[in-house]
Amino acid sequence: MLVYTLVYNAVMSTPVNVHEAKTHFSKLLERVALGEEIIIARAGEPVAKLSSLAPRRARTPGGAEGLRVPDSFFKPLPDDILDVFK
């Protein structure tokens, strides 16, 4: 049990009670977005874990190499289609 407690406390954040979680939910989400896992407790007993669904990947420029936009894309739309937007 001691090993479990030590590992659990080293990996998990300090538990947040249910009332505090409801009151500060948006701030807890900001912490989760930065990679922290939040433990929500009721009467001091952990009951839920708030964590990110997937790690955020950095976007890299590019990715559209080889994409070709046809010249017809830049031609004016026909009048019957333009009339729909009036």
Image (cartoon, helix red, strand yellow):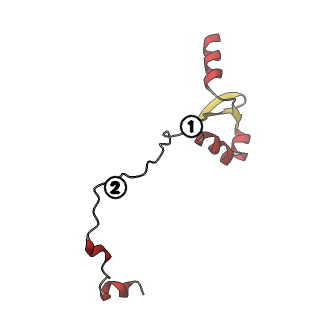
Would you name the residue on which mark 2 appears?
64
Q: Earlier in the sequence, mark 2 or mark 1?
A: 1
x%, y% of residue 27? 68, 45
Q: Is residue 19 left or right of residue 73?
A: right
Q: In front: 63, or 26?
A: 63
Q: Position of residue 16 (x, y in %)?
A: 70, 35
Which element carries disc 2, helix, strand or loop? loop
Q: Residues within 10 Å of mark 2 (few under 14, many from 20)?
A: few
Give the residue displayed 43% in from the left and 51% down from the top: 61
Relative to 60, residue 4 above or below: above
Q: Which x, y percent locates residue 17? A: 72, 35
Residue 1 in view (yes/no): no
Residue type at mark 1?
Answer: Ser
Q: Determine if residue 59 is in view.
A: yes
- 58 displayed left or right of 13: left
The C terminus appears in which quarter of the rendering? bottom left
Which of the two residues, 36 or 70, is positioned nearer the viewer here?
70
Residue at 47 percent of width and 42 percent of height: 57
In the picture, measured across the screen, residue 52 lies left or right of residue 69, that is right
Residue 2: image quadrant is: top right
Which residue is identified by label 1? Answer: 51
**Contact (Cβ within 8 Å) of mark 2 with mark 1:** no
Residue 37, compared with residue 30, is above or below; it is: above
